[in-house]
Image: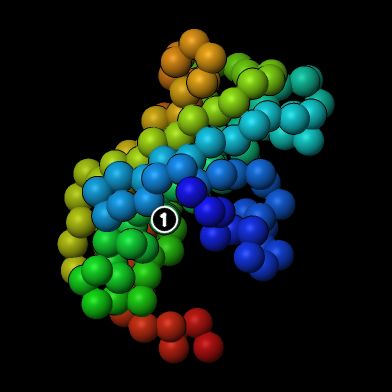
Amino acid sequence: MENPFQDRPTFVSHTGIELTEAEPDRAAGRLVITEDHHQPYGVVHGGVYCTLAETIASTGAAIWAMAQGMAGAVGVTNTTNFLRATTSGVLVAVATPIHRGRSGQLWSVEITREDDGKLVAQSQVRLHNVKDLSAFS
């Protein structure tokens, strides 16, 4: 799948996140880990997991919101639990909705290692449905 994050220089475009699935009921992506993703102790920085989770959840949430006639969705809370340290390889994130309403959504994200399928982080991302983009002007 083409990566829409590479179209312009945004924070996400610099992370290396690759979007692999984007539907209203499920979104997925992957990230090849490099030393750029490490914290000083040589393991993946917690912010990388948070960024991956919010990026994938926001994508699915925005697609759903747009199908409802809204402009999209933006994250307002990201709670990510780090379960296993990772130093290299590929992370895979899968996001699915827990709740979707008029003003907000809640999505669950599981991040696993591609090579052994072990769960390394679990997130819940709460998002606000954006009715129109004038709120950002």
- Compared to residue 87, the image places residue 76 above or below, namely below
Residue 119 x/y as whole percent? 44, 19
Please give the count of numbered marks on the rendered protein. Answer: 1
Q: Amino acid at mark 1?
A: Thr
Q: Is residue 67 visible?
A: yes
Comparing 129 with 27, the one in front is 27
Comparing 39 with 88, the one in front is 88
- Compared to residue 76, the image places residue 94 above or below, namely above
Left or right: 5 as drawn, with respect to 79: right
Q: Is residue 106 visible?
A: no
Comparing 13 with 74, the one in front is 13
Left or right: 78 as drawn, with respect to 3: left
- Compared to residue 42, the image places residue 92 above or below, namely below
- Residue at the spot of label 1: 59
Comparing 33 with 53, the one in front is 33
Residue 19 x/y as whole percent? 50, 47
Query: Which residue is rendered at x = 24% and y = 77% of the image?
Result: 69
The image quadrant that residue 58 belongs to is: bottom left
Query: Which residue is rendered at x = 53% and y = 88% of the image?
Result: 137
Residue 80 x/y as whole percent? 47, 35
| Disc 1 element | helix
The image quadrant that residue 42 belongs to is: top right
